Image: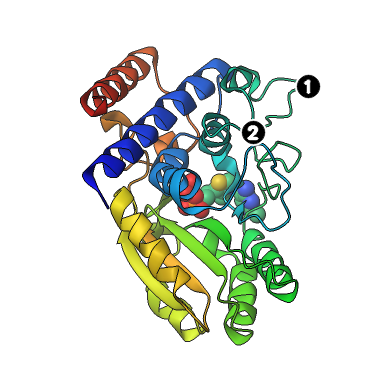
Amino acid sequence: MLTEEKRKLELEAANIRKTALETIHTAGSGHIGGSFSMAEIVTVLYFKAMNIDPADPEKRDRDRLVLSKGHCSPVMYTTLARRGFFPVEHLKTFRKIDSDLSGHVEIHVPGVDMSGGSLGQGLSVALGMAMYGKCNNLNNYVYAIMGDGEIQEGQIWEAAMAAGFYKVNNLIGFVDYNKIQLDGRLTEVMDPSPIDEKFRAFGWNVISCNGQDVEEVANAIEEAKKSEDKPTMIIAHTTKGAGVSVFEDTAHFHGSQPTPEEYEIAIKELDDKIASLEV
Ligand SMILES: Cc1ncc(C[n+]2csc(CCOP(=O)(O)OP(=O)(O)O)c2C)c(N)n1
């Protein structure tokens, strides 16, 4: 990846984090930790990898994304708004009565391909979409982003078994492997590791990468697209709350809100990051 492209993607990820945080702050609620850990993943998908057109969000042969960890709507809605699917100004209505931007992703928002919130269902839906694409020669890719706590759900493994068996190679999953779920570390609650070996055993091509590095995420997607007879799972090693020192590596900011002082620190750090990346 060229240095200039990398800088632009890193700048986009920083802007997405800042706008997502402001969106949560205006609403007074929303999930910071899991949104911030996946910021680079959605940045690379929507600003580099995916075949999508904000002017034609229903384009039949588009790539699709299922945000299975649907509580991370702040980063999803912010990414879609900044990519041009709807005005950034509209984010101010997030979690307000009568707004379409509810706390978990909703399919009627332009650019959203599946409603989410009930964990464990997204990989099955993405598999169905990917099979539809193959059956209808759409020549597209379907992505699904799951949480590492989420893959404790049994339905994930039912979908994994079917996708491997039917060789659905246009299905590309991500596990946002931030090692923390709602109420603690995976290793204390129910450790799903070794995640890579489990998906391999179900017939998947598995790639591990640093999910906070835009270049590594982009390379992993490129590699996944080369798979001819297997679905691919990208295990993205991330940090919950990544990008802001006070939010990082804690279950506290899974859903809790920062104090005014913590919010100020976060905005300052994000502003500094943005300034360092602007030319
Ligand atoms: C079926 C279901 N059970 C429980 C919840 C409540 N819930 C919301 S987020 C969450 C934790 C998810 O952890 P993880 O998948 O690791 O997400 P991340 O850390 O990336 O936010 C839980 C239990 C839910 N949304 N759906």
The verdict on label 1 being within 8 Å of ligand 1 is no
Question: Image point 57% across, 82% down: which residue?
Answer: 164
Q: Please tell me in which quadrant of the rendered image residue 260 appears.
A: top left
**Residue 53, position as x, y percentages in the image:** 62, 43
Secondary element at image label 2: loop
Horizontally, is 182 left or right of 206 in the view? right
Image disc number at residue 225: none
Report which residue position mark 2 lands on. 103
Horizontally, is 224 left or right of 166 in the view? left
Question: Image point 75% across, 71% down: which residue?
Answer: 136
Secondary element at image label 1: loop
The verdict on label 2 being within 8 Å of ligand 1 is no
Distance from disc 2 to disc 1, alpha carbons, whole Å, reads: 12 Å
Horizontally, is 38 left or right of 275 in the view? right
Question: Image point 51% across, 84% down: which residue?
Answer: 203
Above or below residue 108? Residue 48 is below
Q: Amino acid at mark 1?
A: Asp
The count of marks equals 2
**Residue 236, position as x, y percentages in the image:** 37, 58
**Residue 10, position as x, y percentages in the image:** 31, 38
Report which residue position mark 1 lands on. 98
Q: Is residue 192 visible?
A: no
- In depth, the one of 249 and 231 nearer the eye is 231
